[in-house]
Image (cartoon, helix red, strand yellow):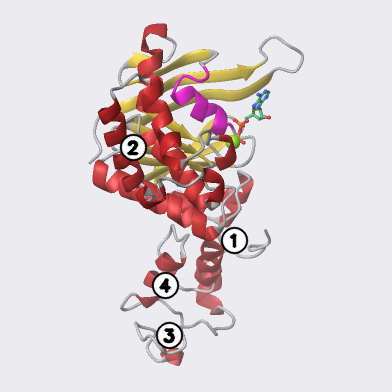
Amino acid sequence: MTGDAFIQIRQVHFVYHPGQPDAVEALRGIDLEVRRGEFLAVVGANGSGKSTLARLLNGLLLPTRGEVRVAGRSTADPAARGEIRRLVGMVFQNPDNQLVAPTVEEDVAFGPENLGLPRDEIARRVRRALEAVGLWERRADPPHRLSGGQKQRVALAGVLAMEPACLVLDEATAMLDPAGRAEVLDAVTRLHREQGITVVLITHFLEEAARAQRVVVMHRGRVVAGGPSAEAFDGPDWLEAVGLAAPPMGRLADRLRRRGWRLPSGIVTVEQLVAALLRPGSPAPGAGDLGGGSAAPGSGGPGMGQRGGGPAAAARNPAAGGVGGG
Ligand code: ADP
Ligand code: MG
């Protein structure tokens, strides 16, 4: 599914207002590759440089130093600019700023029309894009009648109609309610799985990043960590140090671990925690007290009423204490 490097970022620095008294060094030496067909999440606190990085990926911004290559071509090459903008489609945070036309289908047609494509080709693309995000039935609606999640899916369809190779979502769910967030993420996940589209999902929700195959963590203009998503999240203390809130399920798993539960690392979602707790032969300390501690739905949840951790927990977690603040 994933292959060669589609985007290569080499020693990239970016400075806003270079040489001015108010210069801001937003990126300080980024090295990163996005492979073709990969689903990558980029997480980081506010101000860590995520949006700056996003705008460098399709040439909206050019590096102050270093180089960004997309499909082998530098974003600084004026002859490559149009093609790179088409190949790397961006969805931004605010749905209302991205919709321009009186109806959903006219909005989605906007990009292909600007490419000067024939009418039947435009119609084909609009239909395919709206079907991909589940909004074909709503094509005649004015965008302002849609929910936030639906609007973001229209914005996504507008990008898809350009037939990009890569989608960059810059906090595209940040303004949505939980249902809207799920709608957008499900659509993106499906596009990745079924159409092999490359995805760069920028978010500060670690639960969302858990959908990706790989996660990189940004902090003050640098990539400070990265790895398969399940391993990138270890330890609430570490997350707090880079300004990220540990997801509630991650904090709960951490507390259970400190009390001696044997849980795998990288738990961020309810589903992951439930799966870990219900694993056969799982995990409670003193599980004998709790009827075997294995997969017994209806037993009240293995160990959820457990108090204390016992000496084993303390020995395993010498650094215990102080977690779960926020
Ligand atoms: P994030 O998306 O992770 O919140 P940004 O890339 O938006 O981070 O910002 C990185 C840094 O660059 C921050 O210090 C921010 O204040 C600064 N910055 C972002 N946009 C501009 C701008 N247009 N002019 C000046 N500074 C900016
Ligand atoms: Mg941002």
Residue beneath disc 1: 319
How far apart marks 2 and 3 lie (CA) works out to 56 Å
Residue 150 location, x and y as percent? 48, 50
Against 278, is 264 above or below?
A: above
Question: Disc count in the image?
Answer: 4
Against 76, is 155 above or below?
A: below
Camera-nearest label, 1 or 4:
4
- Magenta stretch containing residue 276, yes or no? no
Residue lying farthest right? 21
Mark 1 vs 3, N-terminal side = 3
Quarter of image, ligand 1: top right
Secondary structure under badge 1? Answer: loop
Mark 2 vs 3, N-terminal side = 2
Residue beneath disc 4: 274
What's the amino acid at mark 1? Ala
How far apart marks 2 and 4 lie (CA) works out to 40 Å
Mark 1 vs 4, N-terminal side = 4
Secondary structure under badge 2? Answer: helix
Residue beneath disc 2: 126
